[in-house]
Image (cartoon, rainbow, N blue to C red):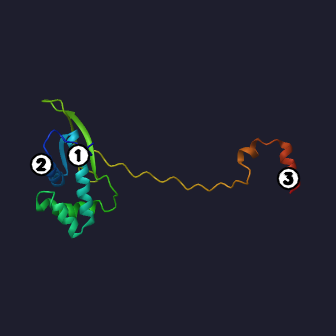
């Protein structure tokens, strides 16, 4: 069982295509491709941004072994690393667009999030729910006090 899509190509062609697509995505920040290819590009592009955020020499060498072009590598380690320094993951967004006329393949845009002129705005982070006070198992609940008979209320008041 494979952990990636083969995309109907030999291994060398597939890797070459992914290298080119990731480089073009970093360069232009949005590309249109088929949905299957976009899902594969998303995996690799997120890994490249992670390397850019690392910023070490070893990370730069690993990234330069994959992406094509020094300008792409520079953008990866400066602009994109700075833009996503506080984000823990999910650097790309996949937007399905249309069905291609020639072969009816589903097409999609893949783009980086939090950039200018993006097709859809990023969702704001969900607010954290307020912290609940831990329950004390020995106190009577409000429901028990609310529905208690008046006799119990009078007895409990006289006991104290």
* Mark with earlier residue (1, 3): 1
Q: Which structural element holds mark 3? A: helix
Please say if 70 is above or below 113: below
Task: Tell me if 149 is positioned left or right of 48 in this view.
Answer: right
- Identify which residue, 14 or 101, lies in the foreground: 14
Task: Tell me if 152 is positioned left or right of 90 in this view.
Answer: right
Q: Mark 1 — residue?
A: 40
Q: Mark 3 — residue?
A: 157
* Mark with earlier residue (1, 2): 2
- Which residue lies at the image location 89% right of the left edge and 53% below the top edge? 158
Q: Quadrant of residue 89?
A: bottom left
Estimate the x, y position of residue 9 in percent, counting from the top left: 13, 41
Estimate the x, y position of residue 55 in percent, counting from the top left: 24, 67
Question: Can you tell which of label 2 and label 3 is closer to the viewer?
Answer: 2
Q: Which structural element holds mark 1? A: helix
Q: Which structural element holds mark 2? A: helix
Q: Residues within 10 Å of mark 2 (few under 14, many from 20)?
A: few
**Count of labels shown?**
3
Q: Mark 2 — residue?
A: 12
């Amino acid at each position: 069982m494979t952990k990636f899509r083969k995309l109907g190509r030999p291994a060398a062609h597939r890797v070459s295509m992914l290298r080119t697509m990731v480089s073009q995505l970093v360069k232009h920040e949005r590309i249109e491709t088929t949905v299957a290819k976009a899902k594969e590009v998303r995996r690799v592009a997120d890994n490249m941004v992670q390397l850019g955020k690392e910023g070490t020499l070893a990370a730069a060498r690993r990234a330069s072994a994959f992406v094509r072009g020094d300008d792409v590598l520079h953008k990866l380690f400066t602009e994109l690393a700075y833009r996503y320094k506080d984000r823990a993951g999910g650097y790309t967004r996949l937007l399905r667009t249309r069905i291609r006329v020639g072969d009816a393949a589903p097409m999609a845009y893949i783009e980086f999030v939090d950039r200018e002129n993006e097709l859809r705005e990023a969702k704001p982070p969900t607010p954290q729910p307020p912290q609940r006070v831990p329950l004390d198992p020995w106190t009577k609940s409000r429901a028990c006090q609310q529905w208690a008979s008046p006799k119990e209320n009078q007895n409990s008041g006289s006991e104290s």
